[in-house]
Amino acid sequence: MSGAPVPMCDPAAEYGALADEIDAAVRRVLASGRYILGPEGAALEAEIAAFVGAPHAVGVASGTDALHLALRAADIGAGDEVIVPAFTFVATAEAVTYTGARPVFADIDLATFCLDPRSVERCLTARTRAIVAVHLFGQTAPLAELAAIARERRLVLVEDCAQALGADDSGRRAGAWGDFGCFSFYPTKNLAAAGDAGMVTAQSARHAERLRMLRHHGSRQTYLHERLGWNSRLDELQAAILRVKLRHLEAFNARRAALAQRYSALLAGTPLVLPTAHGRGRHVWHQYTVRHRRRDALRAALGEAGIASMIYYPLPLYRQPLYAAEHAGLRLEAAEEAAATVLGLPIYPQLSDADQRRVCEVLAACA
Ligand SMILES: Cc1ncc(COP(=O)(O)O)c(C=O)c1O
């Protein structure tokens, strides 16, 4: 089967669709001479806070920094434990490790790839200080249950919303449930910068103020440094580009949802295990992730046809060399099964119906 290559996502096509607006925004910032902590960043913070439905939003340099600085703003550090899913991108756990706290890995629900609250309960100890709920692949973790656990045990609830801007659970958006919502605008995300960028939403003014200090060398007033901070600011060029794209996010997310629905229709009846929506609210389909015992063979067949696919993620985090020694012997059933069987298929707003059909034809022929 031949045809043009199909990538996993296409940032250049997204730029092409919005080039006039993005070019004007970039020129505006360049001409202003104001590149760090200026009006574009402040406006983006206000727009994201309003979109998410959270009282505060603070721009930072990446999604990883968003997680790290949120945990720091909550005073989490050495001697503390933070529960994170075993099946997620490494940054979720890295952020915990940066603070000196210990990540404790909980299992996921295989149907949704998100945290299983019963596994979270089994991980609780006297040292537990926080839970990081990752909204993996574009739909929320079970927020009502996780928020109830956090409330009862007086834990900090951090939402890792890197893959879920615009998703909601029972009418409340991702990032508006926890003490903190941590967003990534990495170039492949649903809202994508032309580089690294991130944002933290916060419920409390005290936390927001701390985040503003932590991202800027522990400083509120020029050359007065009240605590150890970092250099982690979202720059004006990225903010201006993100503000353009935010105006199109609902249309982009709607196209992703239409593509997901079409994948499910075209692949119905194949032996692939198709992803499911939890039904409590909107899924924004950052990824469309199928499962299959022979996923490596499927990946090879797609590759031969010029079609990209990705294994998000090939190892539960406790098996990564970074964490393996400290977590030797840990085996979580659903995380193991997911890591052994998942395959992410191309999904992005500019993916054409014809290319998507080709992906499905190759899969149907060899699944
Ligand atoms: C679930 C998750 N958490 C955190 C991150 C880290 O974000 P960033 O790459 O912007 O640092 C990412 C994405 O890269 C992610 O997918």
Image (tube, rainbow, N blue to C red):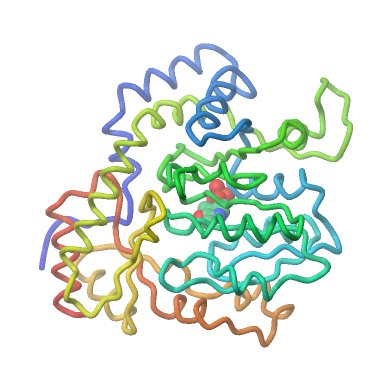
Q: Is residue 261 left or right of residue 276?
A: left
Q: Tell me the quadrant of the picture where the N terminus can be found.
A: bottom left
Q: Which of 300 and 327 lies nearest the eye of the viewer?
A: 327
Question: Residue at 71% of width from left, 33% of height from top?
Answer: 208
296 w.r.t. 274: above or below: below
Question: Residue at 35% of width from left, 65% of height from top?
Answer: 289
256 w.r.t. 79: above or below: above
105 w.r.t. 164: above or below: below
10 w.r.t. 345: above or below: above
Which of the 4 image quarters holds residue 273? bottom left
Q: Tell me the quadrant of the picture where the C terminus can be found.
A: bottom left
Q: Which of 138 and 188 lies nearest the eye of the viewer?
A: 138
Q: Position of residue 329 (x, y in %)?
A: 67, 87
How many marks on residues? 0
Farthest residue toward the bottom? 329
Question: Residue at 45% of width from left, 31% of height from top?
Answer: 242
Q: Position of residue 169 (x, y in %)?
A: 46, 50
Question: Residue at 82% of width from left, 48% of height from top?
Answer: 75
Q: Position of residue 101 (x, y in %)?
A: 79, 61
Q: Is residue 270 left or right of residue 80?
A: left
Q: Is residue 332 left or right of residue 2?
A: right
